[in-house]
Image (cartoon, rainbow, N blue to C red):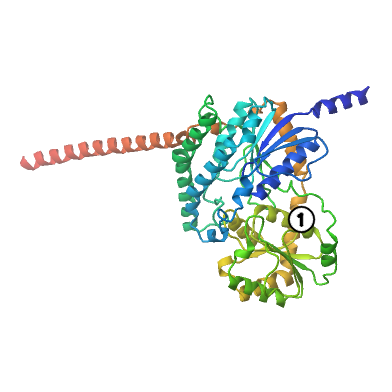
């Protein structure tokens, strides 16, 4: 009888739910995370609909997984006439990211709303038990939770940041928590703290005065009966964070914030024969070099190419270089080029000794997962912060790409390949990532099911979300206190003035007499 009850409870807990996942960013790294999340939910038995600009060539066979593809958006982004040289962003002032993100976020949101496949989904009369939205300056898309009358779950691809903390009432003191566009660590100088604080104020003013009104207007163009955006964006039942203490700085989290960093990394698969032979035959090891899925490495300068060739030619290790063209002039004999490599599987190989990377969060997560030290060449966005963190935590070094030369590169390679401290620190970080009570994907599935089961889980919501900004910052209390102090000082001043006046008047009368 107990066995029957146990199976009954297990069946009830595993009830299939219909879940909509929206990852509209035209960036494959973002899609990798959303796709992995959707597959995990489908493997857990849920009916998942994934909306994004990309398509999975090998969709999961377990469970039900349907993709609504925003066709044409990724192709348009990669046309030569629209493809920007992202390397130009390396020295851009971080404050310029504010208007840049405004433009990008508005474009992403409008393209999603206007896409015929999105409109077809809306008109299909499908229902969903939960709506998961990637949080990437596309706040108007959260109207879908209102439209489907389903709990809203948000997903931050870059962990906790100024983009998400205010939306769930999470404290984020700028005194020791740097924003993602800076190469600061928690140990900031006075001027870094001042810059960080000014950026936070500028971003919040921009968001409330410019960005949110624009998103609100855009939302009502397509959902005229929707409430004001301010009634929608603060309703996240759970916020999943692509972060973990082994990678990111430990910071405060309110109860609805769940760290699942590393959830997208699977057990390593067998490498293709040519790569397997290359890595297996590397007696001195292999250096893996990739600048990610967005940066075109062929756009680096001739001097930088020359520096890479000279430095790679000096080392005894073999080099796997992800390169977007068929060949490169002057390539050393120990270098193997490829337009695509199974990155996580290469990092898992015991002969991989070093990862040269742009410092993206997915690459950082994967290298820590497998315990491989890094040489970071950061360019933009969170890459500089991730690189600074790797240097601080002792499992990597950083060189500004614009300052790359043969001398600096050779020195860094010599240190990273021959000083065991870097690999030891990488292995220590890897142990921290793996030493968790629950696998991150299982944690993500659990909390998704938890939100559905408990109808949005409003008990996780902190009161700070419902406070106006001036009350949250205690400006009303501070103003009242200052008013009381000023009033008291004025009263004391008036009393002292009256007393002194009386004393002086009395003395004057005495002198006359």
In x, y percent, where is residue 480? 39, 34
- Residue 98 in view of the camera: yes
Residue beneath the point at 63% across and 65% down: 298
Q: Is residue 372 left or right of residue 178?
A: right
Q: Quadrant of the N terminus?
A: top right
Q: Give x and y (percent) for residue 294.
A: 63, 55
Looking at the image, residue 364 sits to the left or right of residue 507; the answer is right
- Establish if 213 lies above or below 401: above
Displayed quadrant of residue 119: top right
Task: Name the residue that disc number 1 marks.
Answer: 344
Residue 125 lies in quadrant:
top right
Q: Is residue 403 above or below residue 76?
A: below
Q: Which residue is rendered at x = 67% and y = 73% of the image? A: 329
15 or 89: nearer the viewer: 89
Residue 11 higher or lower than 86, as above or below: above
For image coordinates 84% across by 28% down, the residue present is: 10
Q: Is residue 421 left or right of residue 272?
A: left
The answer to whether residue 175 is above or below residue 20 is below
């Amino acid at each position: 009888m107990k066995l029957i009850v146990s199976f009954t409870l297990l069946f009830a807990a595993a009830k299939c739910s219909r879940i909509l996942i929206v990852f509209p960013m035209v960036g494959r790294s973002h899609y990798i995370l959303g796709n992995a999340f959707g597959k995990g939910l489908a493997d857990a038995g849920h009916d998942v609909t994934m909306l994004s600009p990309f398509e999975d060539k090998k969709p999961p066979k377990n469970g039900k997984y349907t993709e609504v593809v925003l066709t044409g958006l990724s192709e348009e982004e990669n046309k030569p006439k629209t493809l920007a040289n992202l390397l130009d962003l390396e020295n851009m002032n971080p404050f310029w990211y504010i208007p840049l993100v405004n433009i990008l976020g508005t474009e992403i949101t409008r393209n999603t709303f206007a896409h015929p496949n999105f409109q077809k989904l809306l008109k299909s009369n499908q229902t969903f038990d939960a709506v998961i939205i990637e949080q990437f300056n596309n706040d108007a898309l959260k109207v879908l939770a209102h439209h489907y009358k389903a709990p809203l779950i948000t997903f931050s691809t870059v962990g906790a940041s100024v983009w998400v903390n205010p939306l769930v009432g999470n404290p984020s003191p700028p005194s020791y928590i740097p924003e993602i566009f800076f190469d600061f660590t928690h140990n900031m100088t006075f001027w870094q703290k001042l810059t960080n604080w000014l950026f936070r104020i500028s971003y919040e003013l921009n968001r409330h005065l410019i960005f949110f009104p624009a998103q609100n207007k855009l939302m009502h163009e397509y959902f005229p009966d929707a409430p004001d955006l301010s009634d929608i964006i603060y309703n996240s039942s759970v916020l999943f964070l692509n972060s973990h203490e082994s990678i990111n700085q430990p910071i405060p989290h309110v109860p609805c914030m769940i760290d699942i960093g590393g959830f997208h990394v699977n057990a390593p698969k067998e490498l293709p024969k040519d790569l397997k032979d290359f890595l297996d035959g590397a007696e001195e090891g292999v250096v893996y070099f990739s600048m990610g899925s967005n940066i075109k490495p062929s756009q680096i300068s001739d001097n930088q190419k020359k520096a890479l060739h000279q430095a790679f030619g000096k080392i005894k290790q073999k080099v796997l270089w992800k390169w977007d063209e068929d060949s490169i002039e002057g390539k050393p004999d120990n270098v193997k080029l490829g337009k695509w490599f199974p990155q996580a599987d290469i990092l898992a190989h015991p002969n991989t000794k070093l990862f040269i990377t742009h410092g993206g969060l997915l690459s950082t997560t994967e290298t820590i997962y497998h315990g491989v030290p890094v040489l970071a060449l950061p360019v933009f966005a969170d890459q500089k912060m991730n690189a600074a963190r790797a240097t601080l935590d002792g499992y990597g070094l950083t060189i500004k790409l614009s300052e790359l030369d043969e001398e600096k590169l050779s020195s860094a390679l010599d240190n990273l390949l021959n000083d065991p401290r870097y690999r030891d620190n990488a292995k220590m970080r890897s142990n921290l990532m793996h030493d968790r009570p629950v696998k991150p994907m299982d944690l993500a599935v659990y909390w998704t099911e938890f939100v559905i089961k408990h109808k949005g889980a409003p008990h996780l919501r902190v009161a700070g979300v419902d406070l106006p900004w001036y009350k949250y910052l205690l400006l009303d209390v501070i103003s009242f206190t200052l008013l009381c102090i000023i009033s008291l000082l004025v009263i004391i001043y008036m009393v002292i003035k009256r007393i002194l006046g009386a004393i002086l008047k009395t003395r004057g009368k005495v002198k006359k007499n």
